[in-house]
Image: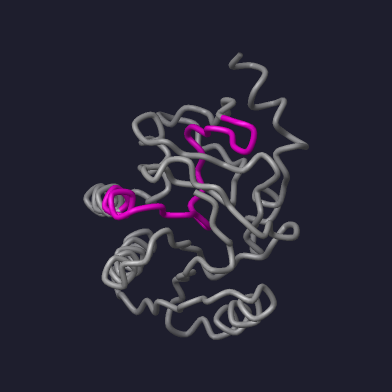
Amino acid sequence: MLIKLKDIPFYYLNFEGYTERKANMEKLAESLNINALRISNSHQADLRQDRIAFGVIKLLHTAIEIGKYPFIMMDDDIEPIKDLPEFITIHDTESLILLGGSLYETGGYKPNMYLEEYNEEYYRIYYMLSMHTMVVSSINTANFLLESIQESLNTHEFLDVDLALRSKEKLYLTPKDGPYFYQNNYNEPITRFLWNDVKDSYLAKYL
């Protein structure tokens, strides 16, 4: 399924009071000519990871209620690394397509990230700690995310940890000519990269 990227609905999570980020996202949406809907987050949980999780749950429920698939969910601190492609291909509506990435590793019980060849356009990716920009391809995939985030709330883990661990059971794809977005905050050094520059470190040792 070939879809024009700019025709896909975009949803972004923005905490109340983060007015500069909101303004930056409005400028980004205008510059990319995309339809971006802000989802406000004012949840007052004690833990930051729980506040984020409640916000993402709200975003997903909003997207499910609107009912347009695929959709793209993103954080409010992203910037494009490169020009976006005009079209994106969705080969499997049960997949998550990660348009952003991260090279950060936690150690411990999470295995290190690695890539596998999938097809000419995508790598299959395992154990990456990043969900700052992703294509949600179907209602089933949205419900999969809700289940993962609920588990994160139950354990008070950051939601990208549980999501990374589920990459063995769910098809996560990342564009070979990407990632397309990075986080313009303290995460920039680990999120602003291209697979073409680092892929050998993540493919070769697992072949």
Q: Residue at x 30, y 64 (%)?
A: 57
**Looking at the image, which is closer to me, 86 or 188?**
86
Residue 155 in percent (x, y) is at 25, 47
Residue found at the very far front of the displayed protein: 1
Spot occupied by residue 90 in the image (x, y as percentages of width and height):
49, 47
Residue under the point 24% across and 49% down: 147
Q: Quadrant of the C terminus?
A: top right
Q: Does 33 sit above or below residue 23?
A: above
Q: Which residue lies furthest to the top in this view?
A: 207
Residue 62, image quadrant: bottom left
Is 131 inside the magenta-drawn segment? yes
| Residue sitting at the far left | 154
Front-most of residues 132 and 154: 132
Q: Is residue 34 magenta?
A: no
Labels in figure, total? 0
Magenta residues span: 119-145
| Looking at the image, residue 92 lies above or below residue 67 | above
Above or below — where is 119 with respect to 179?
A: above
Q: Residue 157: percent from the left, percent from the top?
A: 34, 48
Name which residue lies at 78% across and 37% down: 197
Judge from the rendering whether residue 72 lies leftward or rightward of residue 186; answer left or right: left
Residue 78, given in percent of the width and then of the height, sits at 61, 65
Image quadrant where residue 21 sits: bottom right
Visual colour scheme: one colour
